[in-house]
Image (cartoon, rainbow, N blue to C red):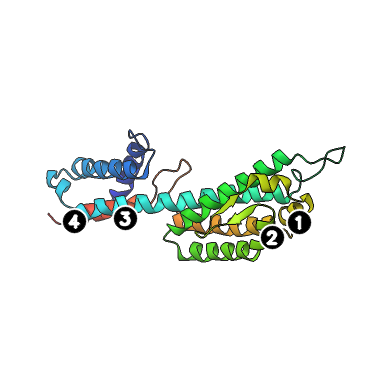
Amino acid sequence: MSNISGINSYILNSYRNAPGSNTADSRASNASDILRKTAVRKTGDPKAQQKTPDSYALVRNKARTSAIEKEAADSAAALRTSALELAGGKVLSPDENGEYDRKAVTESIKQFADNYNKTISAVKRSDSEEAIRKNSSMLGSTAAFRNSLSNIGVNVNDDDSISVDEEKLGSADIRNVKTLFAGNYSYASRIADKADAIAQTERSEIGGAYDRSGDMGSYTNAMVETLLSAEA
């Protein structure tokens, strides 16, 4: 339909500047309102506001889904970064006196654990079967290191999250910590690879639904087409 491109552009421009557009629910509400106003403005048909309640539900559901996929992708990317920082070994290297900054080591592993937990939580709410499969693979890698992690104070919980016993980690043999988290074949390196795979999968699931600003994107074409083709 010839009007779709122009309507889509109008919606996106209005949508990006709409008040309260920082959450999925408010984005959906803004998009629904914009769709209704656009229908009237572009078609000249006041009844267009009541034509397609299902299309507004589509906006809302799509916004929620895309927000979750984006959350999963961002969390997985952050996990990869924190895992690579550990695997790179800098924080797990001694100073000129042969001493380790145990506080920095603990904080780095805590950040790793936080990003890990955010990733698995987001992926569990994802609609991507491929991302869920890759998340299961990552959980399997962690399970394989469960005992070794526990020995240094990193515990795998029943809900698959990991928690850090700071006191135990702070007194753990640094050689065991380095074996787990430093180096190309370490646990941290494996998790970095798994996290990267999850992030890429979730980004591909989003497709064109988000532009560079994180706003709703090209799928509005389909919604506008539904709106304009709906019968009174």
On-image quarter of the N terminus: bottom left
Q: Amino acid at mark 3?
A: Ala
Q: Which numbered disc covers residue 148?
A: 2
Mark nearest the camera among 3 and 2 is: 2
Q: Residue at x 68, y 48 (%)?
A: 168
- Indicate which disc, 1 or 4, sits on the residue closer to the N terminus: 1
Could you give the CA–CA distance between mark 3 and mark 4, rounded to whole angstroms? Answer: 12 Å
Mark 4 belongs to which amino acid? Ala
Please tell me how crowded label 4 is: few (under 14), some (14-19), or many (20+) other residues with Cα within 10 Å.
Answer: few
- Is the residue marked by circle 3 packed among few (<14), some (14-19), or many (20+) residues within 10 Å? few
**Of label 2 and label 4, which has the lower sequence position?**
2
Nearer the camera: disc 3 or disc 1:
1
Q: Nearer the viewer, mark 1 or mark 2?
A: 2
Which three-letter amino acid code belongs to the residue tagged 1? Thr
Reading the image, the residue beneath label 1 is 179
Whole-angstrom CA distance, mark 3 to mark 2, is 51 Å
Q: Which residue is mark 3?
A: 222
